Image (tube, rainbow, N blue to C red):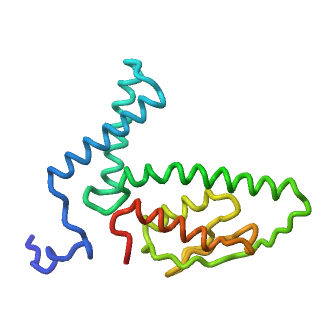
Amino acid sequence: MTTSRSHLETGPIHQAPAPGTGLVVRTAIARGLGYLALWAVLIGIDPLDLAVGLVAAALATWASLRLLRPGVPGLRPMAALLLLPRFVWMSVVAGLDVARRALSPSMPLQPGFITDPVELPRGPLRTWFASITSLMPGTVPVADERDALVYHCLDVSQPVVEQLKAEEAAWAMAMDSVRK
């Protein structure tokens, strides 16, 4: 059976070139060691646990290489680590604010929706950002429109969009190639 040349040339549209073997190996080693280190921190370094941890790290590495190929722009680990104190602080402040509102029946709330125009392109980067901001008490992303995220807020009179812009700026610094 012969196959025409045009049939062979058809394939996935916009398929990115495959990364080099060296990059894949370096990425696999780095991710595997990271997953194993996380396992050791969470479970310990007992020999039996470590054996299970090696298998779990290998599977996690395989999955991560399939889901986020090497060379695809993504999270810069050190920049993301710098977001941790900011995230913890904002979570504490926001949690206290929600607790204050919940315990004070006279505290007026103005629930509603706001639209936050985002510069992050649609896809995994914007989804990650929406996931992070969903952890901020008082705001929940409810829709992803072409150039904006829509949030339900407990109090629309608060400067929610300004807070989201600050979070987006911090998030964008932790990502590679997120601007359109």
Residue at image point 63% right, 53% down: 91
In what quadrant of the picture does the N terminus appear?
bottom left
The total of numbered circles placed on residues is 0
Answer left or right for 109 relative to 35.
right
Residue at image point 63% right, 70% down: 142
Work out whether 55 lies above or below 95.
above
Residue at image point 34% right, 30% down: 54
Q: Quadrant location of residue 61?
A: top left
Q: Nearer the viewer, residue 180 or 89?
A: 89
Q: Quadrant location of residue 143?
A: bottom right
Residue 137 in the image: x percent, y percent? 68, 58
Residue 95 in the image: x percent, y percent? 70, 52
Residue at image point 54% right, 53% down: 86
Work out whether 148 lies above or below 135.
below
Answer left or right for 98 relative to 175.
right
In the orientation shown, which residue stands out farthest toward the top? 47
Answer left or right for 75 relative to 116.
left
In what quadrant of the picture does the C terminus appear?
bottom left
Residue 166 in the image: x percent, y percent? 54, 67
Q: Quadrant location of residue 107?
A: bottom right
Residue 21 in the image: x percent, y percent? 15, 52
In the orientation shown, which residue stands out farthest toward the right? 106
Answer left or right for 132 relative to 93.
left
